Image: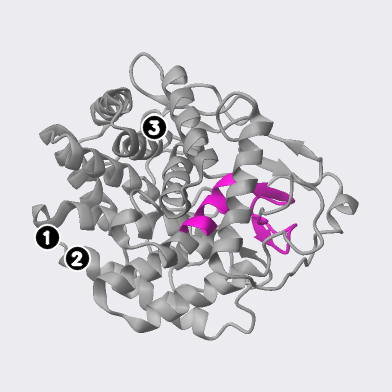
Amino acid sequence: MVISNRPVVDKEALQTYRGHRNARRPDREHADAGIRWILEAQTAAGDGGVSALYDIGLSRWQVSYPETTGYIIPTLLAWHHLTSDGDALTAARVMGDWQIEIQSPDGGTGEPVGVCLLKPRVFNTSQVILGWLALHRQTGDGRYLDAARRAADWIVALQEADGSWTRFTYAGPKAHKVRVGWALLELDAVTPCEAHREAALRSVAWTLRLANDEGWFANASLTEPDRPWTHLIGYVLVGLLEACRMAGDRMDRRQAMVALGAAARRLVERIETLDDAAVGVPGALDPVWDGDGRWSCITGNVQIAFFLRRFAEATGDSRAADAADRLVEGAKTVQFLDGVEDKNVLGGLPGSYPIDGFYAAGSIPNWGVKFFVDALLQRMLPQDAQYCLG
């Protein structure tokens, strides 16, 4: 999910949570609290999807968001794998069925009313594919695979010759759409299709042309061109690494691993110098990985943690694994747990730290909670049980 900042309407309502910190608990307790918050967000939405975010300043839930509901599904199924939590499994199926209900006749899925026009988006649709694939793997229900195929056909038909997507997108071609390629490769692994596979590889090649020598990717920002949020940086890094893993020997991975290695090295260097890992890295980073340290994007921090651990698994880089752990342990301390009685807030995480920072100001975005739980599940589950996480 990508979201621009909006003014905090009632700063006084946020004072209770500004600077909130709590004691660390075991991974499973933090993950359970996050899952409970996600289920509460689904209940609040009332249509089967997951409310995009809870606005603390306005004490208001937003409408369901198809994109993030899509990639929340694998999180719930991984949690069910770990815990046999029947509520999580039921919720995931309801989400997947809702996605089928709202799928457009041509295969795409859209934006929520009130955020943008209700029309299909390439990126959103690809993230729903991840959810449908996870449900098909869990249940064997062919409806989910059929929906994923139709979605992929629509996505591929819209791709430009250079591997980018410019139509039915938010803000045009962006580096984070490498996650579209990842989703297509996940689908190709289940039901092989040359058109899906080749489109994915073109997407990866296009994305790699945006990398500089430092492992920073251009065209990744929705606001300042040279300062993408770490949320979007996390999208790019995880998406590219997962696409490379899925592509295997069907692509030359050397260029990608050089870029990813440079990014990992620079991020590790920043994390190792942090005075407070809860605050994390600056919320937006420029081409030499520098940024304004007055606020941090909590969502981006946990996505970067997921990337660094996955990178460490692929390369044996222990410093990357240690840095990932440091970010996860820091994020634990800003999850809303100690002293929190509001069920709409309990178990969530702020989009920014401090809570009125630039990203998702004054709010708990559902995707931030999802990525936090993913980073915890990554430490609790073997990699083959982490299907479509991240």
The residue shown at (43%, 26%) is 109
| Amino acid at the residue labelled 3 | Thr
- Asked if residue 359 is among those painted magenta in the image, a careful observer would answer yes
| Amino acid at the residue labelled 1 | Asp
Residue 311: % across, % down: 32, 69
Picture quadrant where residue 263 is located? bottom left
Callout 2 touching callout 3 (CB < 8 Å): no
Choose between 199 and 228: the one closer to the eye: 199
Tell me if 166 is positioned left or right of 146 in this view. Answer: right
As drawn, which residue projects farthest toward the top? 105
Q: Is residue 265 visible?
A: yes
Question: In the rendered structure, which disc, 1 or 3, sits on the residue that comes first in sequence?
Answer: 3
- Location of mark 3 (residue): 125
The numbered dot on residue 255 is 2
The numbered dot on residue 252 is 1
Choose between 296 and 285: the one closer to the eye: 296
Residue 33: % across, % down: 63, 55
| Amino acid at the residue labelled 2 | Gln
The residue shown at (66%, 40%) is 40
For the residues carrying marks 2 and 3, which lies nearer the camera in this image?
3
- Asked if residue 312 is among those painted magenta in the image, a careful observer would answer no
Callout 2 touching callout 1 (CB < 8 Å): yes
